[in-house]
Amino acid sequence: MEAASPAGPDTPEPLAEGAAGEFSSLLRRIKGKLFTWHILKTIALGQMLSLCICGTAITSQYLAERYKVNTPMLQSFINYCLLFLIYTAMLAFRSGSDNLLVILKRKWWKYILLGLADVEANYVIVRAYQYTTLTSVQLLDCFGIPVLMALSWFILYARYRVIHFIAVAVCLLGVGTMVGADILAGREDNSGNDVLIGDILVLLGASLYAISNVCEEYIVKKLSRQEFLGMVGLFGTIISGIQLPAVRGICPVYVLPVQLHAIGD
């Protein structure tokens, strides 16, 4: 009986073809799930939001360092006023359970706490630019991620995998490293206390942002986006308006000539 001749170099191997086919099928499935209109739109909106946040950070740092203009509460007050004029007005003209007065009767104290957390988060983050650097603020702001995960675990009943907890550990390690680097750098130019104050303000602001974001997700999913923005606009305007003269967010009058002279130069 004649033995079968071995496959030549040009003969395709079934195993290789099967592996290539499975890999191609996997790529098609990944492409079908990732490159959808919903995913692409979410990524685009997220990048636009990141650009706006980056612009706010840069302008706040520039005003604080270049012109000594520190107006953290005024910046927040303007944002809340815009939300109030648009979304709170929308709630006022609605009927039924979505009406502004009905919402206030049932949940006014909850939205006061939410508005307070959101206002103070914006205030302390912008205030931190007076004490620390833009890089430190942006890096330490990620501390809100582990806080948000902890709150989501108990409030939204979210569950995470091991990789998520590893990422949180890396995040906390980075936060500790950044604070230590700021303290060491501040000792060289005798500004260690100010830098530490700025870092603490960022960590506090990130924690308050996490509280606000968890509440936002719950309200948007369970109720409506308009209700969240309208009530935050209402109580954010009230709280920041009361706090604005208390913390002297607007520059004192005696500083204005110096600022005008600096702008002219």
Image (tube, helix red, strand yellow):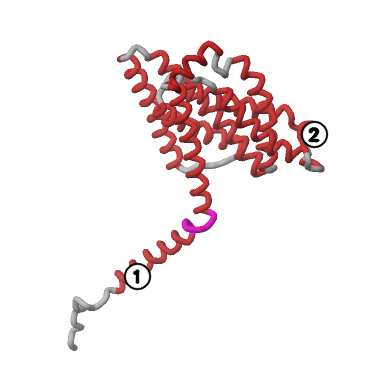
Residue lying at the far front in this picture: please name it. 264
Q: Give the image location of residue 153, x and y in percent.
A: 56, 37
Left or right of 255 on screen, residue 10: left
Nearest the viewer among 70 and 133 is: 70
Residue at x 68%, y 41% (from the top left corner): 226
Query: Quick one: label 1, few (<14), some, or many (20+) residues within 10 Å?
Result: few
Residue at x 47%, y 58% (from the top left corner): 35
Task: Give, as a three-letter code, the residue at label 1.
Answer: Gly
Query: Quick one: label 2, few (<14), some, or many (20+) residues within 10 Å?
Result: some
User: Where does label 1 land, which residue?
Assistant: 18
Q: Give the image location of residue 135, x and y in percent.
A: 39, 29
User: Where does label 2 land, which residue?
Assistant: 101
Q: Is residue 124 above or below residue 255?
A: below
Nearest the viewer among 151 and 37 is: 37
Residue at x 58%, y 23% (from the top left corner): 73
Q: Give the image location of residue 98, x and y in percent.
A: 77, 41
Q: For the magenta stretch, what is the residue range? A: 33-38
Between marks 2 and 1, how big is the CA–CA gap? Answer: 65 Å
User: Where on the picture, by quarter, is residue 247?
Assistant: top right
